[in-house]
Amino acid sequence: MKLVVRGRRFHRSVLSTLILSCSSQLLAQDNPPLTEEAYWQDVPTVISVTRMSQPVIDSPVAVTVIDRRMIEASGAREIPELFRLVPGFVVGYHDGHTPSVSYHLTIDRYARQMQVLIDGRSVYTTAIGGIPWATLPITLDDIERIEVVRGPNSASYGANSFLGVINIITRHPVLDKGTSVKTNLGNEGVREVFVRHGGGSGKLDYRVTAGFIEDDGLRHRFDYKRTRLVSMRAGYSINSTDVLSFEGGVGTGPRGVENRSSDIHELSPDREKTVLNHHQQIKWERTLGAGESLSVQFYHIFQRNFETYTTEPLTLASSGGIDWVVDPIFIDFSRHTDRYDLEMQHNVNLAESLRAAWGLGLREDQVWGGENLMNNQDVHNNLKFGFMNMEWAASRAWLFNAGTMIEDYSTTGTEISPRIGTNYRVTPNQSVRLTYSKAVRTPSMFEYAANYHYGGSTSYYNGGTRIGAGPDVYNQEWVGTRQAKVEEIKSYELGYHYIALNGKAEFDVKWYNDDLDNIIGLSNNTVNVPANDIDGMNQLFRNRDSYVEKGVELETKITFVDKSSLYFGYAYTNLDERQKDANGDLITVRSSTRAPKNSFSLLYMMGFDSGYSAGIGYYFTDRVQGWETASGDHVRDQVRRLDLRVARDINLDHYDIELALVARNVLGSYEEMEILRPRSNYPYLNMTDSSAYLTVKVSM
Amino acid sequence: MRRAGVIWIVLFGLVFCTTAQARLLLLVSHETPLYQSFEQGFKTSLDSLDKAPKVESMLADDYRPEHQELEPGSVVVVAGVEAAKKVPLSEFEGVSVIYTMLPLSSYDWLRDNKMLAKDHKVVLIDQPAYRFINLAQVALPDLESLGYLYGDASAEYVPQLAKAATVHKIDFHAIALNRDRRLVTMLQEAYSANDAVLVLPDPYLFNRRVLQGLLLASLRAKKPLIGYSESYIDAGALLALYSSPEQLGRQSAEVAVCYLQDRPDDAGVVSYARYFSVGVNNTIARQMRISLPKPAEIQARLQALESD
């Protein structure tokens, strides 16, 4: 018998030796080499919470993984909607093109305390904080999976990874060869077209996506959006150890902006703004050995919000037939941000049971804000950072994780964010974890250096005829004094994770106690107000709020014998606000409604023969305080939401067709997180209605 | 008096018959859907008989020999590795035992550690090596060479695969996965020298990092990856061959019936999985521009080859 192994011949004697050596190895083992579960279990999920690949059971913090099946079954049209699935998350809409995603504490539409990464690139808007979800040049079909770290993770990903981190991982271009065309059509003016093409030549693989997204926004709101986007991802295998990756994209388009920002609608009429978001990212990675690698990454992000308009004449007072009128003022709320980031990371095995991921980096943020936002200022924030995460497998049962991030900001100084934790394997498929993390959030450039104001000339009118000039008027609203410090969170987490032996079921429970301090908010101020300010008062951004949040979160995923799957998430949050005086001394502690007490999500995913599939998503959010409340605290009532999706895949010889019908929010309208001011031009409450859309996708 | 005597004789006969009736006992490793499916396949197969024997099933952990009297002729079906390890050997004297849902490597380990009953048969999860070679040839008729990536646990398949490949005149290359070598180098070797690559169960292979490397290398080289489970198809392998728990239950029931009816089973002590399914990833096939027959057609042809 001829046996060719790597071009050489082996004789029977060598073969016998091979068999004997395998047998002796088997005898030497304490346990059989394989169990039956190896033949039926799903491929284990590996995550990158600590910048090292780890199975979920070894993660020092709770992680939710949203995979492709969940993305499709959910019926989501936009990425933020997916996070309704995640325990403890609140997803709301300020208007049709401004979604916001926050974890536990939800204050306003900017959600400044969440970090979002796309393939290692931070898309956090340093100008005003938050994420420009609607302009990100990425589509749902581009996404392979999303890892959501539920808890602080500055030790791995730096400041602003404060309440949590959303890590979006896009599909490798080699998986998307061919061309596909997809369209979504639905009510609320939904019209979307996406074209994707993946190809390769030699060692190069690439994918290009182009899309046009249009909808009319929420009912009775002036908040339409039209977005055009193009993105690409390419990978070039230089040799057997080196890979070069490149990503680039641009998203742009107009949005309707409704009077929202002032009690006086003449100062803020309905208008249109244009947004632009583009990025370039290049990464070189060398594989050094099993689990060892070296990478260098550079990216640039540009985000621009172009928003200018002219106010309408505003009558300030009338007396004896003479009107005192504010002349039309040119308002500039435009802003743009340039971010340049260079980072190196080395993953290394230090010893048999000790490995580490460490790195260094530089970042520069350049923010410009228009006249009425930041006085046409350029503000620069330079950052130097270094990080180290280590994992020590002390024994078969005990695993220790430790990490820290050291950051030196030119605006706020040096910050250290440590994490230490341990995982104990009760059995091979059950672990208990205990972790302490500290994280920080740096002020956005707006909180740091804002000068949000109106100002202009006035005139006197008699019967509609201008009779003379009046005094200039000025109203300063929000100010950043460049003295805001970082926000801090100290978090304790106790968790339990269980994976069924065949990998078909997974369960996680997390108890947590988080202490949030120095949270930046607006405080009324009458000191050092400009002399010509019309009301002698402004609001300063300062570190004034403090919270304690405690709770428990459950998550489970089950795959049944018939291949259907169930995902269930539940969160209980108890949020207390600590009120302090100007000196920082505690005055009182009171219960806060800035986080829903209870929330849960349920997604049932089914696949049938003949290519049919379906998804049922049910979401419940308890009462929670709304955003930008005009008068006192307005608490939004409980919300129940049901989404349904039915799809059919038709596989033909040369192409596949996917047809899907999605019915969203079939239980009826509910109030959105953004609560309107009573003097708005549109006096209706901000409502999310029931809607439906049809998808047709052809892949070749 | 006579009536009382008759009654006693009848009662005695009933007790005797009850005591003498052979039992069919199923011991499973865990109470999970996997074993529930196995049990369902097992019982469904028995239900098709005219006089279906009653199956008593329990967790191997709960089995207490002192409470479970097994008469000669009884059959015990032990499902899974944990059950095989836990069940006491000595209690099975005179009783036939069927070990099922066992990987071949684990059966070898149990045998070498003298943990198996004296009179036993085995139904393995594994497919016979020649079936993978048949699959490669039926689905990919132009195939001339096949690479086999193996670790410590899957090394034992090398000789069987080599032999089967020789019969079909396929060049067979076995490539050992070595932690000291770079994975990407080993994968490149495998795909550059072969028309397709095969992997079988091995702990080294079953993690996402290695699997992703396998898959990416397969797509880049436009050469198929052949796996051993539905999970591999979902993850991106082009073809897979596997047996479901129900199929193994059905096969185990057939062996049990032979024992209970005291009929010879021509399969021998160790049987590979008899019933199987073929998985095909059409999306990957289209990306590689490979035209494949439908899974049912491939399966039928494989079954026809085996019955020849």
Image (cartoon, coloured by chain):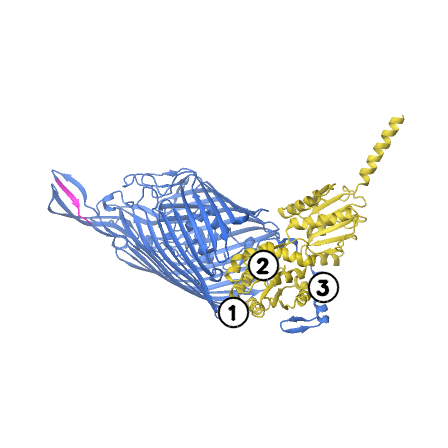
Q: Label 1, on which residue?
A: A241
Helix, strand or loop at label 2? It is strand
> CA separation, marks 2 and 3?
33 Å
Quarter of the image where the N terminus of chain B is located? top right
Between marks 2 and 1, how big is the CA–CA gap? 28 Å
Mark nearer the N terminus (3 vs 1): 3
Q: Secondary structure at mark 1?
A: loop
In the rendered structure, the colour chosen for chain B is yellow
| Dot 3 and dot 1 residues touching (CB under 8 Å) | no
Residue to which mark 2 is pinned: B239
Judging by colour alone, the chain drawn in blue in this rendered image is A
Nearest-to-viewer mark from 2 and 3: 2
Horizontal and vertical percent position of residue A340: 37, 63
Q: Between B174 and A316, which is closer to the camera in this rendering?
A: B174
Q: Is residue A327 magenta?
A: yes
Vertical placement of A390 versus A593: above or below? Answer: below
Which amino acid lies under the numbered mark 2 shown in the image of this protein?
A: Leu
The part of the chain drawn in magenta is: A322-328
